[in-house]
Image (spheres, helix red, strand yellow):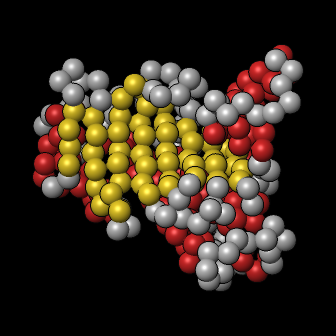
């Protein structure tokens, strides 16, 4: 699906130009929609994805937990309502959990404040996925969702493999990062001081894996959009449904 994007990023590497110039040149060669503000504070690229339009934007952060600039990617996939999933770097999860706990205990709140970002509210609402099947994922990430069976199926396969690989490059420093499936859409946020072909290519690889896994789950769900029960059979997680994690990552 996004392989063409990654190939074009690869072609743009090593060529003249840097920063936005290289990104603009790549977009022009690729026939993608590109625009940037005159001050160089942000750019937007739109590309086809699963029959929809993917929007990738870099600019000032829209979240308090991301300092400086961030990369945002989103696409509307019309996913089922049962797919409410969140993955983030473990330091970010621990930080948000602490902030949420302190906020509610200090203010003696008994209900969730709807003004908080949904990713913070979800930490208090949804169960976490047990990632002990993979040492790298368990050490570096946290995953949660409204349905733990769906959450495990989403992460246990190509997405988990891409996230594990990212600990060697894109997320080696464990900068704030999250993936989120919500209201039919897939989102990515990453603290990114300076965008470049390599980092954007890595982001697309992770985002593509998240999208593909979500679409695969959608195809396996009951006809009519019915939700999986939390006690659904573990047969959904066998190799016939999803690839086993590679032995080298256990």
The one nearer the camera, 157 or 95, is 95
In the image, residue 31 above or below residue 21: below
Residue 34: which quarter of the image? top left
- Residue 145 visible, this orientation: yes
In the image, residue 210 above or below residue 235: above
- Residue 241 visible, this orientation: no
Q: Is residue 30 left or right of residue 158?
A: left
Quadrant assignment for the N terminus: bottom left
The spot of residue 21 in percent (x, y) is: 16, 34
Q: Is residue 139 left or right of residue 185?
A: right
The spot of residue 217 in percent (x, y) is: 60, 71
The spot of residue 137 in percent (x, y) is: 68, 50
Residue 218: which quarter of the image? bottom right
The spot of residue 94 in percent (x, y) is: 73, 32
- The residue at the point 35 percent across, 39 percent down is 57
The one nearer the camera, 154 or 222, is 222
- The residue at the point 73 percent across, 24 percent down is 99
In the image, residue 64 above or below residue 223: above
- Residue farthest toward the top in the current orientation of the protein: 106
Quadrant assignment for the C terminus: bottom right
- The residue at the point 42 percent across, 40 percent down is 72
- The residue at the point 49 percent across, 64 percent down is 78
Q: Is residue 37 left or right of residue 73?
A: left
Count of all numbered marks drawn on residues in the image: 0
The one nearer the camera, 149 or 133, is 149
């Amino acid at each position: 699906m996004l392989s063409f994007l990654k190939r074009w990023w690869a072609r743009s590497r090593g060529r003249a130009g840097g920063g936005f110039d290289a990104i603009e040149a790549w977009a022009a060669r690729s026939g993608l929609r590109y625009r940037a503000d005159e001050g160089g504070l942000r750019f937007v690229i739109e590309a086809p994805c699963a029959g929809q339009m993917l929007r990738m934007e870099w600019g000032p952060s829209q979240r308090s937990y991301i300092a400086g600039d961030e990369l945002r990617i989103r696409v509307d996939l019309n996913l089922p309502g049962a797919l409410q999933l969140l993955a983030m770097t473990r330091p970010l999860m621990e930080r948000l959990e602490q902030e949420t706990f302190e906020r509610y205990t200090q203010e003696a709140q008994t209900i969730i404040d709807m003004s908080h970002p949904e990713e913070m509210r979800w930490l208090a609402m949804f169960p976490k996925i047990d990632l002990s099947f993979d040492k790298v994922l368990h050490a570096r990430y946290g995953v949660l969702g409204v349905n733990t069976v769906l959450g495990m199926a989403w992460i246990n396969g190509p997405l988990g493999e891409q996230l594990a690989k990212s600990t060697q490059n894109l997320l080696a420093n464990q900068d704030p990062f999250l993936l989120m499936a919500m209201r039919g859409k897939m989102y990515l946020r990453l603290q990114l001081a300076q965008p470049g072909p390599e980092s954007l290519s890595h982001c697309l690889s992770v985002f593509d894996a998240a999208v593909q896994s979500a679409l695969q789950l959608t195809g396996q769900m009951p006809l009519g959009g019915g939700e999986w029960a939390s006690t659904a059979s573990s047969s959904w997680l066998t190799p016939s449904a999803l690839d086993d994690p590679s032995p080298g990552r256990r």
